[in-house]
Amino acid sequence: MPHVPPPNSAIAELAEALGEDSARELVDMFLGSFEAVLRDLNAGDHEQRKRAAHSLKSSARIVGAGVLSNRMAELEARLTNTAGDVTHEDITATIEEFERIAVSLRAFARQSGA
């Protein structure tokens, strides 16, 4: 399998600071936790949804998924500052953006450090 370089500058910085294996581990954790965070975002109580948005905002930023991080920042603000809630459109857009960025993240994460 050919070497897949870090897919964005945020992961390249992680790889430089922590090593590629650790960066891959962090990316893999991000990918693996998405389903649970999405479930909390979709079905949790108001506070749980706000925590899920905050968590996904932070982890997305760490792996260089800026669009997803910004989307979650807006959702977190809506859940914090108003009586707003998570809509079906929020969930759909979140899944679509995750799937868009997950392709390159999965390719990077699935390599061993050989």
Image (cartoon, rainbow, N blue to C red):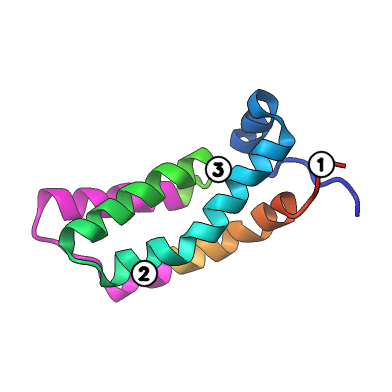
> CA gap, disc 1 to disc 2?
32 Å
Quarter location, residue 44: bottom left
Amino acid type assigned to the residue bearing label 1 in the image? Gly
Does residue 73 appear to the left or right of 1 in the view shown? left
> CA gap, disc 2 to disc 3?
20 Å
Label 1: which residue? 113
Label 2: which residue? 39
Q: Nearer the viewer, residue 89 or 79?
A: 79
Dot 3: what SS?
A: loop
Label 3: which residue? 63
Amino acid type assigned to the residue bearing label 2 in the image? Arg
Residue 14 percent coordinates (x, y): 62, 31
Report if residue 11 is visible in the image. yes
Q: Residue at x 37, y 53 (%)?
A: 71
User: Do residues under tags 1 and 3 come within 8 Å of each other at their CB atoms?
Assistant: no
Residue 74 percent coordinates (x, y): 28, 50
Q: Is residue 48 above or below residue 27?
A: below
Q: Is residue 24 magenta?
A: no
Q: Quadrant of the C terminus?
A: top right
Amino acid type assigned to the residue bearing label 3 in the image? Val
